[in-house]
Image: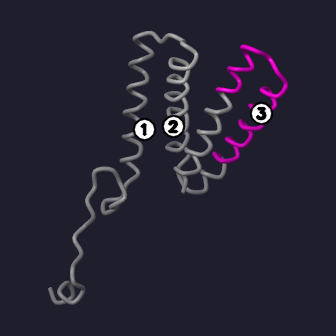
């Protein structure tokens, strides 16, 4: 649930960033108010996510995820340029999100990336061993 709320909040932040960028190019009260409302909604989703996870992990996933998507949005939609160092930073950010997600897995958690569910044992057989 924590990752779902972080994803929803990060999505709201990304949409707000897009609208704020549009406002920077053509100032309008509608763009500004919409961006502010979306930033408020994203902050609310983040605060709620803290009930389900660690601040360290959720904050890092949030920050890096928004950074990656906002950078791609800047590149693809607004034709902004990134240096080689910034591109390397994006790659490291992506790697860190994967590492954070995998590190949250318990030893027998079949929902985690790359994990297979443990074999089910017959309870009678397990009791008689």
Q: Does the magenta run of residues contain 21?
A: yes
Spatial CA distance of label 2 from label 3 is 25 Å
Identify which residue is drawn at 61% across, 32% down.
14
Please report contact status of discs 3 and 1: CB closer than 8 Å, yes or no.
no
Q: Determine which residue is flagged by label 2.
A: 60
**Segment tinted magenta in the rendering:** 18-46
Mark 2 Cα shell of 10 Å, populated few (<14), some (14-19), many (≥20): some
- Residue 68 — which label? none
Q: Determine which residue is flagged by label 3.
A: 34
Task: Of the two numbered discs 2 and 3 on the same chain, state the one appearing first in sequence.
Answer: 3
Q: Determine which residue is flagged by label 1.
A: 97
> What is the residue that sits farthest to the left in this orientation?
129
Give the quadrant of residue 31: top right
Percent coordinates x, y for residue 101 in the rendering: 41, 46
Identify which residue is drawn at 38% across, 25% down.
91
Residue 66 as seen in the image, left or right of residue 42: left
Residue 59 as seen in the image, left or right of residue 37: left
Percent coordinates x, y for residue 125 in the rendering: 17, 87
- Under circle 1, the secondary element is helix
Mark 3 Cα shell of 10 Å, populated few (<14), some (14-19), many (≥20): some
């Amino acid at each position: 649930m924590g990752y779902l709320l972080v994803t929803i909040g990060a999505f709201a932040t990304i949409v707000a960033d897009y609208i704020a960028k549009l406002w920077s190019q053509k100032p309008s009260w509608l763009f500004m108010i919409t961006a502010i409302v979306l930033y408020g909604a994203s902050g609310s989703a983040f605060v709620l996510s803290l009930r389900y996870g660690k601040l360290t992990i959720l904050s890092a996933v949030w920050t890096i995820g928004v950074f990656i998507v906002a950078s791609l949005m800047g590149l693809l939609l607004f034709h902004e340029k990134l240096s080689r160092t910034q591109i390397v930073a994006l790659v490291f950010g992506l790697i860190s999100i994967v590492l954070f997600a995998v590190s949250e897995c318990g030893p027998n958690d079949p929902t985690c990336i790359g994990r297979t569910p443990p074999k089910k044992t017959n309870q009678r057989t397990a009791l008689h061993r």
